[in-house]
Image: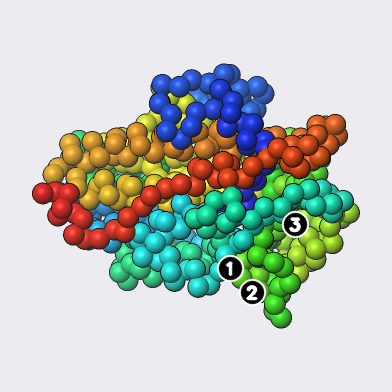
């Protein structure tokens, strides 16, 4: 079910990985090292050359001064802005699009994502609009049911809902003051000014001088590139995704449905009484050309699964053409000592800008939400104390989050690779032995454990004192 889209694959492949010495737990020490990646999977990420810009002192004097500027009004950016707002800290969000990017389909939030949404005060409002998912069913491509699970039997406090990206963004944006988001504000230049400020120049010539810059600008983040990060790496799979529409009511039980084939997998999950999210993930040696004609995308997706269960084909058929997307899956492995730091001076990265991951654990959006609330809490106590305190707070955020997101990124990648097996013998073992007899869902969802108390303005004064 998970990059603005998410689908979680709770298979025994992950259970095997969790017991492997190659994988650290989310609380592992940063000193852990990994074996060299084979082919594209085990290729070491290298630094990209940072971008440098220059600016005159007169430009600095004319720049609009801000304490906190957030680059990007996606899930990470808006969640960070709302988290800071709850703590009484104003931020300016700049977004290059003319309005909220409400395109896309759906994403799945597990209980860690809902804990954050509760902490920032929007969980109840969102719950009322989306169905709670009770369990999951795994099928073979011929429609045979391999295994089914009920979430409340595997983990009592688990909470899973598929959420429309548009509604999530609009809900977050509505929590902010009217002037908190500046649209049509594409970033053109970044420059460090002295030791405590960063100058941002927009395409329209506007200059912003910020004490803190938070890069929430997605997997192709210009802020991350400026900080020396390489482009995310294609992992060998692409995915079609869409949102089926049933105006008279969709017929499905509130369960995640997975279908596993050879080098091909698909799934669908009810989002609301009238909408059903679906995906089809397939192996491809390269990302391939970008296709913008939605009718072509729909036909390609249908062709891939034309002999698969009829209910999947029906969901795709009932999908409006303009909601279908084809996405190459990418990630970035944050190798210790090799990857650049997530913070530099007063500049820091959040969400996909820092740790893009494949959607195989359903944790891309959830981790971005976690980033947002943790960073906000650490900044709240540091802003009044000066640049040194801010820099220390950002480093503390990086240390805490690295130990969580790096293992999850690797696990998501390896689970996806294992689920995309093409060998018929291995696929038969996966379906008939591993999934049917060995997999236990509860241990596979331990990474969704995350405690998060509500954010309150009084928290800042309590921390400061």
Instruction: Residue 187 in the image: state x and y as whole percent.
Output: 39, 50
Res. 131 mark: 1
The residue that disc 2 covers is 273
Query: What is the distance, in whole Å, between disc 2 and disc 1 at their CAs?
Result: 8 Å
Q: Is residue 23 above or below residue 62?
A: above
Compare marks 1 and 3 and give the one earlier in the sequence: 1
Residue sitting at x 57%, y 56%: 152
User: How dense is the environment of label 2, judged by Cα within 10 Å: few (below 14), some, or many (20 and up)?
Assistant: some
Q: Going by the image, does 131 lie left or right of 139? A: left
Report whether residue 58 is seen.
Answer: no
Query: What is the distance, in whole Å, between disc 1 and disc 3 at their CAs?
Result: 27 Å
Viewer-proximal residue among 205 and 370: 370
Compare marks 3 and 2 and give the one earlier in the sequence: 2
Residue sitting at x 53%, y 72%: 129
The residue that disc 3 covers is 297
Q: Are marks 1 and 3 in contact (CB under 8 Å)?
A: no
Quarter occupied by residue 422: top right
Viewer-proximal residue among 190 and 9: 9
Viewer-proximal residue among 16 and 359: 16
């Amino acid at each position: 079910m998970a990059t603005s889209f998410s689908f979680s694959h709770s298979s025994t492949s992950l259970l095997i990985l969790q017991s492997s010495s190659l994988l650290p737990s989310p609380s592992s020490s940063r000193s852990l090292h990994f074996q060299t990646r084979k082919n594209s999977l085990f290729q070491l990420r290298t630094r990209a050359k940072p971008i440098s810009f220059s600016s005159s002192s007169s430009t600095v004097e004319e720049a609009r001064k801000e304490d906190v500027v957030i680059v990007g009004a996606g899930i990470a950016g808006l969640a960070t802005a709302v988290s800071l707002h709850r703590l009484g800290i104003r931020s300016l969000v700049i977004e290059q699009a003319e309005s909220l990017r409400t395109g896309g389909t759906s994403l799945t939030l597990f209980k860690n994502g809902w804990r954050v949404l509760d902490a920032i005060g929007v969980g109840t409002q969102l719950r009322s609009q989306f169905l709670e998912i009770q369990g999951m069913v795994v099928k073979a491509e011929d429609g045979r049911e391999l295994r089914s699970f009920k979430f409340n039997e595997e983990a009592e406090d688990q909470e899973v809902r598929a959420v429309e990206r548009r509604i999530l963004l609009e809900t977050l944006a509505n929590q902010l003051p009217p002037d908190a988001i500046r649209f049509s504000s594409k970033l053109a230049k970044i420059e460090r000014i002295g030791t405590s400020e960063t100058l941002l120049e927009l395409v329209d010539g506007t200059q912003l001088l910020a004490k803190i810059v938070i890069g929430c600008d997605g997997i192709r983040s210009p802020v991350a590139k400026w900080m020396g990060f390489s482009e995310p790496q294609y992992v060998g799979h692409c995915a079609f995704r869409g949102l089926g529409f049933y105006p008279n009511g969709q017929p499905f039980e509130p369960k995640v449905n997975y279908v596993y084939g050879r080098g091909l997998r698909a799934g669908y999950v009810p989002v609301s009484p009238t909408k059903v999210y679906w995906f089809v993930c397939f192996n491809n040696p390269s990302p391939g050309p970008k296709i913008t004609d939605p009718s072509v995308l729909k036909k390609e997706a249908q062709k891939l699964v034309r002999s698969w269960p009829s209910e999947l084909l029906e969901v795709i058929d009932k999908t409006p053409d303009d909601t279908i997307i084809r996405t190459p899956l990418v990630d970035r492995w944050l190798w210790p000592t090799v990857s650049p730091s997530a913070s530099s001076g007063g500049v820091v990265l959040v969400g996909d800008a820092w740790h893009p991951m494949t959607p195989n654990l359903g944790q891309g959006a959830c981790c971005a939400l976690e980033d947002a609330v943790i960073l906000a809490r650490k900044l709240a106590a540091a802003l009044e104390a000066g640049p040194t305190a801010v820099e220390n707070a950002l480093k503390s955020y990086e240390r805490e989050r690295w130990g969580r997101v790096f293992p999850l990124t690797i696990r998501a990648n390896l689970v996806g690779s294992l689920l995309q097996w093409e060998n018929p013998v291995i696929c038969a073992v996966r379906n008939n032995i591993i999934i049917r007899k060995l997999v236990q869902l509860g241990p596979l969802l331990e990474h969704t454990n995350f405690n998060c108390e509500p954010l309150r303005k009084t928290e800042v004064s309590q921390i400061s004192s």
